[in-house]
Image (cartoon, grey):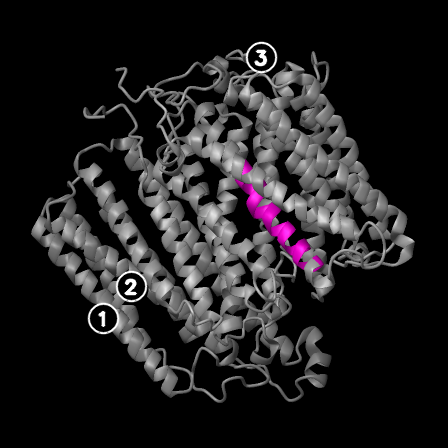
Amino acid sequence: MGHDSHDHKPKGFVNRWLMTTNHKDIGTLYLVFAFAMFITGGAMAMIIRLELFQPGLQFVEPDFFNQMTTMHALIMVFGAVMPAFVGLANWMIPMMIGAPDMALPRMNNWSFWILPFAFALLGSTLFMDGGAPAGGWTMYPPLVLQGGKNVAYLVFAVHLMGISSIMGAINVIATIMNMRAPNVGYLNMPLFVWTWLITAFLLIAVMPVLAGAVTMLLTDRYFGTSFFNAAGGGDPVLFQHIFWFFGHPEVYIMILPSFGVVSEIIPTFARKPLFGYVSMVYATAGIAFLSFIVWAHHMFSVGMPLGGELYFMYATMMIAVPTGVKIFNWVATMWKGAMTFETPMLFSLAFVVLFTIGGFSGVMMALAPVDLQYHDTYFIVAHFHYVLVPGAIFAIIAAAYYWLPKWSGHMYSERLGKIHFWWSTISVNVLFFPQHFLGLAGMPRRIPDYSTQFAEFNMMSSIGGFAFGLAQVFFIYIVVKTVRGGKKAEANAWGDAKGLEWTVPSPAPHHTFDEFGPVDLKKMAHGEVH
Amino acid sequence: MSEVNADQYFVPHKARWPIVGSIGLTATVLGAAHVLNSETTVTPWLMYAGLIIILVMMFGWFGEVIKESEEGLYNTGVDTSFRMGMIWFIFSEVMFFACFFGALFYARTLSVPWLGGEGTGLSTNEVLWNGYEGVWPTNGPAALGGHFEVLDPFHLPLINTMLLLTSSVTVTIAHHAMRANHRSQTVIWLVATVLLGAAFMYLQVTEYIEAYHLNLTLESGIYGSTFFMLTGFHGMHVTLGAIMLAVITVRVAKGHFKPDRHFGFEAVAWYWHFVDVVWLGLFIFVYIL
């Protein structure tokens, strides 16, 4: 059997990276790209926090400030969080289900290699006259249409990102449905694979809707259509409906894979199988289903009929049920476990606690009458940053620490990892917790200047922001150090972690599971549950 | 990689074409953005160059896949992956059209009646658009684009419906012929399908010209917007589908595919049925109702 290409890595940048069809290399490309975007978007966040450090206008023009909030969000959502999870999916899914590679390896390459071009296109708007889009990442008309030249670039960049996401998602679905080792059933799959299967479905369902929405923006702006123009019988609110029909599932696209990551890590370090595996699967599917029928809770203040407000309020609150199932399952997994607190576990624990805070503030805003008070204030900023930063980002960081030994063959420094954890966790709370109070006191979002009554909490938030930003630079140092050297990692880096990825050597050979055949279900994370 | 192992999933090496595709896409949209913003320095040439690069990429990429397929490198597992890829791609297309249908339904059942004073829109109507009735078809309270007339659904659109429905039948007959290994019959019925698609497009263009004579344009408010965007995107998909069918016809004539293995054929047939179903939605919701 042993044919020549086994574990033979192609030489040179073009062969190794530009023309690669290897799921591990493409995963690495995604992760590196996501990290670069995370730093770029983070730098924009630093500009925002610098300007908000004190009341008054100190450093940037208001229009540039708005460009920063808009670009920060677009880059973080489409450039950092989503590609990071696709990177994790690429690296881990084939190894977790015993597949030789992703189902459609060439398309996998294209999914990635569209992204740098898409973000170059988007980033180029910063250097045009009129500047980058400044109407917020939600691109609401008519404001966004007044953005000058950048509208066309913004729309086309979103199209390219959409093409990339759809192809990536199709690949993930085809891989999971078709490439599982012959004896791996759906309910033997690791939860990370399950959450990604559902995420991929969400992506394919909603990215085309976003593409349609921005296409309507384009034709309204350049071709005289009236989709969002009341004078022609359209309605700007129509855009909000379409956008949030995409936008709410999009939120879960960013959080479901996090749930998957945490569901892998907690059992490993609690040394117990995941509690309620099947209920986790159903809860994930339930959240995904609900995500399609709650979108207008983003629009309570837009002037919907009362029936709409009530329906979307109650539907939204129902999401707390499957989410609660997950939280309690994680807690029950840890109950009486032989717990140890390595860095990935610490980040996962922080995820459970801090994501839940974000979840609770979400339930608060689901209440239509009180949302009128919170809407477009710093309370919503605090809410979605709690679910995205100590939520999604912490899960990505936890995944990086958890699987870095498998990727690089080296153990990271536990001491540095713990410093990174405490530094990040404390600073992220200093950064975002005060924003709840700012919002409740009435400070609006997306403004470069504010009333002096908000000064203290803003200064606190900015200090937390700078500290958190610095902590992530420290994270680069840890990752680079680990990749370059360090203690050799065992095949099963955590001793007794379950999962097929831990049955192959560390670092994982360039090609794994080449001989497509049955795997040992006892070694899978949930293989023995059924 | 010379010998073919039926158990082994074919993992290609060196994907040359994706990066070409990315460059093509970027050149196209960059050129288009310049054109839209009337920056004539780079002129439309960048856009055309991009489109040509995309075409080259498609020829190259599909050519490579067809070659590998004919060499028998693809086992049942690879075939299943392709099928899933196509099914989910069509699902994404369904959602794309759903977006525009959603805009149509929203305008007809909510925003236009509100502008006409229904529901919570009473004061809006009285203060801003006094006298506006909000009756479909409409180009809005400001009557954007001026007075227009709509097309008779039971003239060209009905003929077009017949054409597309017939083409779905012919492509199915071709599929049966393929399965029975009647190659020349397959080609004949595929050619018939392509011709029906071309006839559809011809009538669609005729209809657009007629619409512009009736002053129904893309700028005719929400009616013109939804009408032209829905039928326009559908027409683009029919054109694409017809081109794909033509390619398949050539491949059948060249002796590609086997009675039991012809995924490329089936994928295009699925796509063709998909554009057919979308048309039925258009015929009912855009033209008749």
Disc 2/disc 3 C-alpha distance (Å): 59 Å
Front tag of 1 and 3: 3
The disc labelled 3 sits on which kind of residue? Lys
Marks 1 and 2 on same chain: yes
Locate residue A101, reporting x and y percent: 38, 29
Do tag 2 and tag 3 residues touch (Cβ < 8 Å)? no
Residue marked by disc 3 = A487
Disc 1/disc 2 C-alpha distance (Å): 11 Å
Q: Chain of mark 2?
A: B
Residue marked by disc 1 = B199
- Disc marking residue B239: 2
Q: Is A383 left, or right, of B280 in this rendering? A: right
Between A488 and B125, the residue placed more toward the observer is A488
Q: Which quadrant does the C terminus of chain B fall into?
A: bottom left
In the displayed structure, A58 sits above or below A478; it is: below
Q: Is A486 left, or right, of A185 in this rendering? A: right
Q: Is residue A75 visible?
A: yes
The disc labelled 1 sits on which kind of residue? Ala
Query: Magenta stretch: dominant SS?
Result: helix
Locate residue A526, reporting x and y percent: 53, 20
Q: Is A212 left, or right, of B19 in this rendering? A: right
- Identified at 42% across, 65% down, the residue is B32
Locate residue A212, reporting x and y percent: 49, 60
Q: Is A92 left, or right, of A379 in this rendering? A: left
Q: Earlier in the sequence, mark 1 or mark 2?
A: 1
Circle 1 crowding by C-alpha within 10 Å: few under 14, some 14–19, many from 20? some
- Disc marking residue B186: none
